[in-house]
Amino acid sequence: MKKVINSPKAPGAIGPYSQAIEANGLVFVSGQLPINAVTGEMPESIEEQTRQSLENMRFILESAGLTMANVVKTVVLLQDMSLFAAMNKVYAEFFEGDYPARCAFAVKQLPKDALVEIECVAAR
């Protein structure tokens, strides 16, 4: 059985998908754009965008009763790999102890011309 997870603190889905789905003890969080749910604004720098994307992810996990420590896998999508080092520095601030598995890709374009989008899988 699957359960839809939503957080009013994270921006709503901009398409036909859920913020997250829980199934069999795993929570699959959709890619989080760096949009502030309160203002609807997106910060400009890669550092601020990374922070906002990860905060959105954290809000969704909290709605599922989880924390960033439950994250086992992330996928980072970047507008350009030249942004990797700056993203990585902020990313490291959100995890303590063992880091989750991760892959990072440069993509041609992200929705709303974002510089970064981050998704994750978390386990209970």
Image: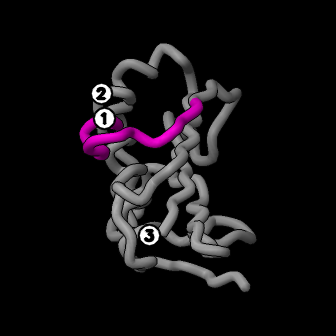
Q: Which residues are magenta?
A: 91-103
Quadrant including the N terminus: bottom right
The extreme top residue here reads: 82
Tell me if label 1 and label 2 are in contact, CB under 8 Å: yes
Q: Amino acid at mark 1?
A: Ala
Q: Residue at x 51, y 79 (%)?
A: 6
The one nearer the camera, 43 or 57, is 57
Tell me if label 2 and label 3 are in contact, CB under 8 Å: no
Q: Which residue does the numbered mark 3 point to in the structure image?
A: 60
Point out which mark residue 92 bears: 1
* Residue 10, above or below 73: below
- What crowding class fits label 1: few (fewer than 14 Cα within 10 Å), some (14-19), or many (20 or more)? few
Q: CA distance from mark 1 to mark 2?
A: 5 Å
Say if the magenta span includes residue 36: no
Q: CA distance from mark 1 to mark 3?
A: 19 Å
Q: Position of residue 24 (x, y in %)?
A: 65, 74
* Residue 80, above or below 30: above
For mark 3, give the secondary structure.
helix
Q: Amino acid at mark 3?
A: Ile
- What crowding class fits label 2: few (fewer than 14 Cα within 10 Å), some (14-19), or many (20 or more)? few
State left or right for residue 18 relative to residue 116: right
Q: Which residue does the numbered mark 2 point to in the structure image?
A: 89
Q: Amino acid at mark 2?
A: Lys
State left or right for residue 10 relative to residue 39: right
Q: Looking at the image, tell me whether mark 2 or mark 3 is earlier in sequence order.
A: 3
- What crowding class fits label 3: few (fewer than 14 Cα within 10 Å), some (14-19), or many (20 or more)? many
Q: CA distance from mark 2 to mark 3?
A: 22 Å
For mark 2, give the secondary structure.
helix
Q: Looking at the image, tell me whether mark 1 or mark 3 is earlier in sequence order.
A: 3
Determine which quarter of the picture holds residue 5.
bottom right
Q: Residue at x 70, y 27 (%)?
A: 108
